[in-house]
Amino acid sequence: MNSTLTKKTAILGFGNPVRADDGVGIYVIEQLKAHLEEEEHISLFDMGTSAFEVLFKLRGQERIILVDAVLHTGEAVGTVYRLPASEVEGQIEEDPMVFLHSLKWHQALSYARKMLGDDYPEDIEVYLIAIDDTRFNVGMTEPAKQGGDKVVKLVLEEMGGSVS
């Protein structure tokens, strides 16, 4: 079995960059590209666009890391939560009316599990960043950005890289 440092890993950032802090998952992917894009065993995906198409690209991945915003936690904006996907993963959704441009990560996991079958990786973790601003606005608040930066640092440490 591969170590965490060499496991074929897909990192997926969810969010909408024109909905203020909701774009923090996409921000994390943009920041990670500067550090990890040359790593052959790491694939970075912006799930804000073409989300459903990305699910097919998960075949062969041994590990998945998801990054998204979470509303109404009661904690300060920018607070980071790290948990295994099994803690919040739902049942496979059979809804044919899911709008592909608004696919949420728990839906993405349920579809990926169905599409990949035995190739679905068991090593899945989720980073959630507390937010409270999702109004129509390009750009994030500084606390949400700081939460995103914390996740970038944590993922880079996990992947054996560093922030320069």
Image (spheres, rainbow, N blue to C red):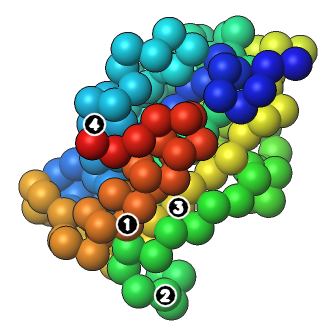
Q: Amino acid at mark 4?
A: Glu
Label 1 vs label 3, nearer the camera: 1
Does the CB distance between marks 1 and 2 fall below 8 Å? no
Mark 2 = which residue? 75
The image shows residue 156 at horizontal and vertical percentages of 47, 42
Locate residue 48, reporting x and y percent: 35, 36
Helix, strand or loop at disc 4?
helix
Looking at the picture, which amino acid does disc 2 mark?
Answer: Glu
Picture residue at 87% right of the left edge, 18% below the top: 1
Dot 1 amino acid type: Gly
- The CA span between labels 1 and 4 is 14 Å
Question: Separation of disc 1 and disc 3 at Cα?
Answer: 9 Å
Residue beneath the point at 34% across and 57% down: 149
Give the residue type that dot 3 points to: Leu
Tag 1 residue = 147
Mark 2 / mark 4, whichever is N-terminal: 4
